[in-house]
Image (cartoon, rainbow, N blue to C red):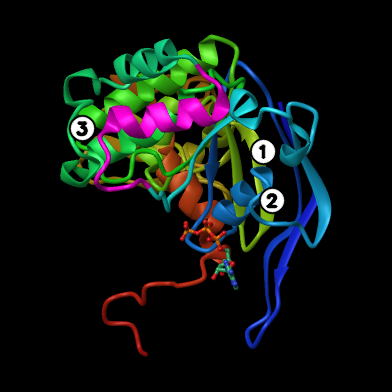
Amino acid sequence: MIRAHGLTKRYGGKNPKTAVDDLSFEVRPGTVTGFLGPNGAGKSTTMRMLLGLDAPTSGRCTVGGRAYAGHSAPLTEVGALLEARSIHPGRSAYHHLMALAHTHGFPRSRVEAVLGTTGLSDVAGRRVKGFSLGMGQRLGIAAALLGDPATLILDEPVNGLDPEGVLWIRNLLKAQAADGRTVLVSSHLMSEMAVTADHLIIVGRGKLLADTTVERFVRDSGTGSVKVVSPAAAHLAELLAGPAVTITSDTPGTLDIRGTDAEHIGRTAAAHAVPLFELTPHSASLEQAFMDLTHDSVEYVTPLEGAAA
Ligand SMILES: Nc1ncnc2c1ncn2[C@@H]1O[C@H](COP(=O)(O)OP(=O)(O)OP(=O)(O)O)[C@@H](O)[C@H]1O
């Protein structure tokens, strides 16, 4: 379990900045929790505070009931993958993990186990400097798993991975959560989070914007639509018209309806004897729901093409 309460981080200097602003949330075991937010939203800073690498200006956070520094053997409590990693380039993956295991008193069998889990057994003897980005990510994850921790905190673990690597991470995170671990993972890839995470914590400009399940977030975003095919489409459109309802039609006889649901459309059609050939709800994509929610929190907005500067 990860808990943050009133977590705040302000950076001083010439450009003072509140990177994390009164953030409170819980990350429960047994689920993959996606940590999302636009660039500069404060995700990495929050993760660094959870890992005791940055001190909060105010508020507090605990992992497994204690502040990170309060754990006597942190690697057995929390495994972390942060964006900046320092691995001696001349060392082999095996030696890198063995050195880490040695420092923390873990047996060689743990090194062999995590090399197997991360698919690195065959390349374990190769020097890290020859590793691809994807292999480096796998090695970082192997190190995070070394202490068989109850909590995993991973910052952008799918960065730079090919589709097979992305699928591998997805299955790994799900399996770790299914084993009862607490898994917090940040990502920019919404489509990937939609299929990996069960729960979402979304931040914007350091503040909490949403703390909900993926399913509820997408459903409540209100950006879903219903496709209707009917020989009396124009009549049905008149029956459904209302201030909150938007109806568009790209093809004669086909309507794309937003602002109401399939049940209401079906009942209205039945009440007026309008035949329906198709009635298909399309839920919004996580990406669209995320863009709608975070639009006002984006630090660097790309100007629309053709818009006045
Ligand atoms: N050491 C620092 N000194 C000053 N400002 C900082 C420092 N570290 C981060 N910031 C600022 O704090 C804000 C949050 O940064 P952070 O890296 O936590 O965001 P993020 O959500 O992880 O972003 P990204 O998705 O781009 O990695 C940003 O505006 C960043 O410029």
Residue at point 20%, 39% (across, down): 127
Q: Specify whether residue 128 is in view.
A: yes
Vertical arrangement, residue 237 with respect to residue 246, above or below: above
Tag 1–tag 2 contact (CB < 8 Å): yes
- Residue 196 shown left or right of residue 305 in the figure: right
x and y percent of residue 130 in the render?
Answer: 15, 44
Query: Mark 3 sits on what residue?
Result: 163
- Look at mark 2 in the image and give the residue it sits on: 208
Image position of 178 with respect to 152: above or below:
above
Left or right side of 298 for 158: left
- Estimate the spatial distance between the alpha carbons at disc 3 and disc 1, rounded to whole Å: 28 Å
Which secondary structure, mark 2?
strand
Q: Residue at x 45, y 18 (%)?
A: 174
Tell me which amino acid carries mark 2. Answer: Leu
What is the magenta range?
Answer: 87-106
Q: Secondary structure at mark 3?
A: helix
* Image quadrant occupied by the C terminus: bottom left
Query: Is residue 226 among what the camera can see?
Result: no
Q: Nearer the viewer, residue 308 or 259?
A: 308
Secondary structure beneath dot 1 equals strand
Image depth: mark 3 or mark 1 in front: 3
Quarter of the image containing the N terminus? top right
Dividing the image into four quarters, tell me where ligand 1 lies: bottom right
From the viewer's side, name the closer residue of 212 and 230: 212
Q: Residues within 10 Å of mark 3 (few under 14, many from 20)?
A: few
Q: Amino acid at mark 3?
A: Pro
The structure residue drawn at horizontal position 84% and vertical position 52%, both measured from the top left corner, is 59
Q: Position of residue 41 (x, y in %)?
A: 57, 59
Q: Which residue is mark 1?
A: 211
Of pointers 3 and 1, the one earlier in the residue sequence: 3
